[in-house]
Image (cartoon, grey):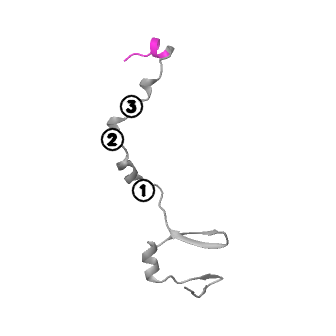
């Protein structure tokens, strides 16, 4: 698809048709970068996007092994530490 570059002050811009906006999932902001002499426009990725789903997919915390219990004790553990 060919589109015209539109003057915006000293810059140029393009109009992206609504079907393409919807297909790509573009909202109010996008990520823009150059890759091998091509302009790439991608949906914005928010910080920590997808973390909640990743935590839900992880195994429950009850299965985690305590890491400190696997380490051998040292002098402080045997002489100075009291519960």
Q: Residue at x 63, y 73 (%)?
A: 38
Local SS, label 3: loop
Q: How crowded is mark 2: few (under 14 residues within 10 Å), some or many (20 or more)?
A: few
Quadrant (top left, top right, bottom left, bottom right) of the C terminus: top left
In the rendered view, would you say 61 is above or below 10? Answer: above
Task: Give me the residue at 45% from left, 13% from top.
Answer: 78
The 10 Å Cα crowd at callout 1, few under 14, some 14 to 19, many 20 or more, is few
Q: Which mark is residue 65?
A: 3
Q: Which of marks 3 and 1 is nearer the N terminus?
A: 1
Tag 1's secondary structure? loop
> What residue is at 62 percent from the left and 84 percent from the top?
9
Q: Which mark is residue 60?
A: 2
As measured in the structure, the alpha-carbon distance from the residue carrying label 3 to the one carrying label 2 is 11 Å
Q: Position of residue 58 (x, y in %)?
A: 37, 45
* Residue at point 45%, 77% (across, down): 21
Q: Which of 70 and 76 is in front in this view?
A: 70
State the quadrant of the N terminus: bottom right
Instruction: Looking at the image, tell me whether mark 1 or mark 2 is earlier in sequence order.
Output: 1
The label on residue 66 is none
Range shown magenta: 76-83
- Dot 3: within a 10 Å radius of its alpha carbon, few (fewer than 14), some, or many (20 or more) residues? few
Please tell me in which quadrant of the rendered image residue 5 appears. Answer: bottom right
User: Spatial distance from mark 1 to mark 2, Cα to Cα?
Assistant: 18 Å
Residue holding disc 1: 50
As drawn, 46 above or below 25: above
The prevailing secondary structure element of the residues shown in magenta is helix
Comparing 34 with 27, the one in front is 34
Q: Image check: 31 left or right of 66?
A: right
């Amino acid at each position: 698809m060919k589109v015209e570059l539109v003057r915006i002050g000293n810059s140029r811009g393009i109009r992206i048709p609504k079907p393409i906006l919807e297909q790509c999932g573009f909202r109010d902001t996008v990520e823009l970068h150059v890759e091998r002499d091509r302009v790439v426009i991608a949906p914005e990725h928010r910080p920590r996007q997808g973390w909640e789903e990743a935590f839900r997919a992880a195994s429950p915390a009850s299965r985690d092994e305590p890491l400190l219990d696997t380490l051998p004790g040292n002098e402080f553990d045997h002489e100075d530490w009291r519960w």
